[in-house]
Amino acid sequence: MKKTILISMVLFALIFSILNNAFSDDFTNAMMKAKKNLNAALNTYDEKDLMKVRGEFERILQLKKNEWIVNYYMAYIDYSIATSAMSSNDNDKLKKYTQSGYSVIDKSIEQKDDFSDAYVLKMSLCFNRWMYEPDKMQDIISSTQQADAMAVKLDKEEHWFDIGTPQSYQAALAQSRRYFQCLGNTEIILG
């Protein structure tokens, strides 16, 4: 009788551990953790915290899964650091992180060219350039308009790119949820 109970408990534990491992994957777990840490870092807007989270996303890239969304978050972190540099009038840091973000968002767009959020972020990064390249205003305006046109083209029914309105945030969340549903991770990644 004791052997039967012991064997049953061992089998139950074994089955539970197998099922638990089957339903969790490294990418989802890493994204959950990184997204949580990103939210915390954005609350403090501390560059060191943001860079630490960016490092987490760089390590997630090594998993070679859904690289487009990982690159999107890395570009978003670069944009966040650039905007914090803008408030302290540090044009060198602003330029460095705007250019880095621009490069990374281009990778994201190259990997998934129908993600309108990426074009909105690209538009914001283009706009940052006017702080350190005022002599290239025509190019900045052109790049911003191209990114805006793609965002509108990809997301006609949702005008969430009118940044600052309550509808914009709801629509952005709905758009992101649709993409994460394709990944099967809506509740996990978006919270």
Image (cartoon, rainbow, N blue to C red):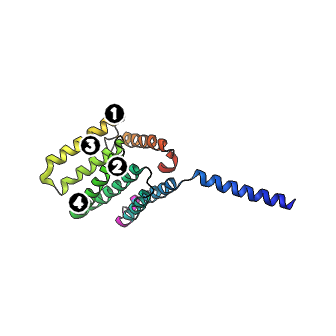
The answer to whether the residues at label 3 and label 1 have Cβ atoms under 8 Å apart is no
Work out whether 29 lies above or below 153: below
Which of the two discs, 4 and 2, labels the residue nearer the N terminus? 4
Task: Pinpoint residue 181: horizontal percent, then vertical percent.
Answer: 49, 42
Task: Pinpoint residue 60: horizontal percent, then vertical percent.
Answer: 44, 58
The answer to whether the residues at label 4 and label 2 have Cβ atoms under 8 Å apart is no
Q: Amino acid at mark 2?
A: Ser
Judge from the rendering whether residue 69 lies leftward or rightward of residue 18; answer left or right.
Answer: left
- List the residue tagged with mark 2: 108
> From the viewer's perspective, is the residue at label 3 or at label 2 nearer?
2
**Within the image, what quadrant is residue 172 found in?**
top left
- What's the magenta region? 42-48
Which of the two discs, 3 and 2, labels the residue nearer the N terminus? 2
- List the residue tagged with mark 3: 147
In the picture, the disc for residue 156 is 1
Badge 3 marks a residue whose secondary structure is helix
**Within the image, what quadrant is residue 112 found in?**
top left
- Residue at image x 36%, y 35%? 158
Task: Pinpoint residue 127: horizontal percent, then vertical percent.
Answer: 23, 50
Q: CA distance from mark 1 to mark 4?
A: 32 Å
How busy is the neighbourhood of tag 1: few (under 14 within 10 Å), some, or many (20 plus)?
Answer: few
- Residue at image x 85%, y 61%? 2
Q: Amino acid at mark 3?
A: Ala
Query: Residue 161 magenta-drawn?
Result: no
